[in-house]
Amino acid sequence: MAFGNTKWIWMNGKFVPWHEATFHVSAHALHYGSGVFEGVRCYETANGPAVFRLDDHLARLYASAAVYGIEIPAEPEELAEATCELISLNGFSSCYVRHISFYGSDSLALHPGNCPVQVAILAWPWGSLLGAAATSGVRITVSPWLKFHSQMMPTRAKACGQYLNSILAVRDAVARGYHEALLLNSQGHIAEGSSENLFVVCDGRIFTNDERDSILLGITRDSVIEIARDLGYDVETQTLHLEDLLNADEAFFTGTAAEIAPVSEVDGKPIGNGLAGRITTQIRNAFVAAVAGFDRRYEHWLTPVEQTAEVVI
Ligand code: PMP
């Protein structure tokens, strides 16, 4: 089981053993997806584990919650502190962290009414989402499922139920032998992968889309824009058409779970020479240096995890 090494979960202000971290089957969120979440990574550095862009992820969590009227029963500072303690208690040097806040059990009317808001943090060791393809190249397919328009559901929010759209797309892609799906939006422009943003490289310039094309504004995306500009590249945000991707020299996905992964082909058509491109590799190396604390310019993105001695239950 992926979570086999996780001993402790943080739940509503307390650390509880893994098997005690349960909620009732009548929870509103289980029936309707009425929750919000974050995916964050903690990386090993020379000074111990450090959480990458924790404050930015928590800011997005609270922004997502605000859209759905979810009043998270904890301050961001408390969640930040609990995140670090949880990683330390579990003894992880690197891991993935999931924050979730959702409507619990009171009523199953669609309006969540008095359903109590729950909040929890889970951490577990997790390698790159795309496995070996993250190095050799991700084979993607244009999904028959469209990304929902941001007026249907707020694509800038990371809400549980919104992910059924991504699940349909990735299941279809995998069933047809691809690693990942690429979703177009209702205007036929490129939106994003099931859980990644897309960048294309053309004639040494880098392009990505933005919220106008119904994407989640990824924190990895934002980091890559800054890193690429620091490397001297011109990065432009504009609508991306499928032809832009098919004619690109290089393309890559970004996301917390997927990290930076070259896209090698789209529906059987190679992108560039079908291998990880030079600029993609350069950006990826710079990203790896940033998250591992080797590049001082990005130190402010890292929250060090202090060692916690004991659990306060
Ligand atoms: N798009 C979607 C739909 C996602 O779920 C994710 C993963 N959170 C991303 C993009 C990338 O966002 P981030 O870099 O913040 O993980």
Image (cartoon, rainbow, N blue to C red):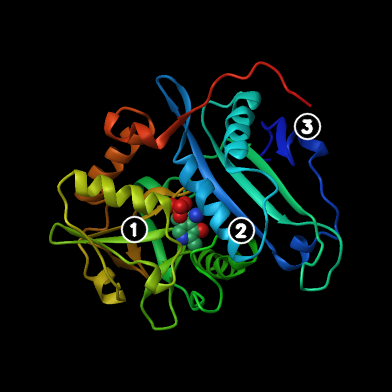
Residue of label 1: 263
Question: Could you say which is closer to the camera, residue 5 or residue 186?
Answer: 186
Q: In the rendered view, tell whether residue 99 sits above or below residue 141.
A: above
Residue of label 3: 17
Question: Could you say which is closer to the camera, residue 57 or residue 2?
Answer: 57
CB-based contact (under 8 Å), mark 2 and mark 1: no
Q: Quadrant of the N terminus?
A: top right
Task: Please give left or right for residue 224 compared with residue 81 in the image.
Answer: left
Q: CA distance from mark 3 to mark 1?
A: 40 Å
Secondary structure at numbered mark 3? strand
Q: In the rendered view, tell whether residue 182 sits above or below residue 137.
A: below
Residue 255 position, x and y percent, is 43, 52
Q: Amino acid at mark 1?
A: Val
Q: Nearer the viewer, mark 2 or mark 1?
A: 2
Q: CA distance from mark 2 to mark 3?
A: 26 Å
Few, some or many residues within 10 Å of mark 3 (<14, 14–19, 20+) = some
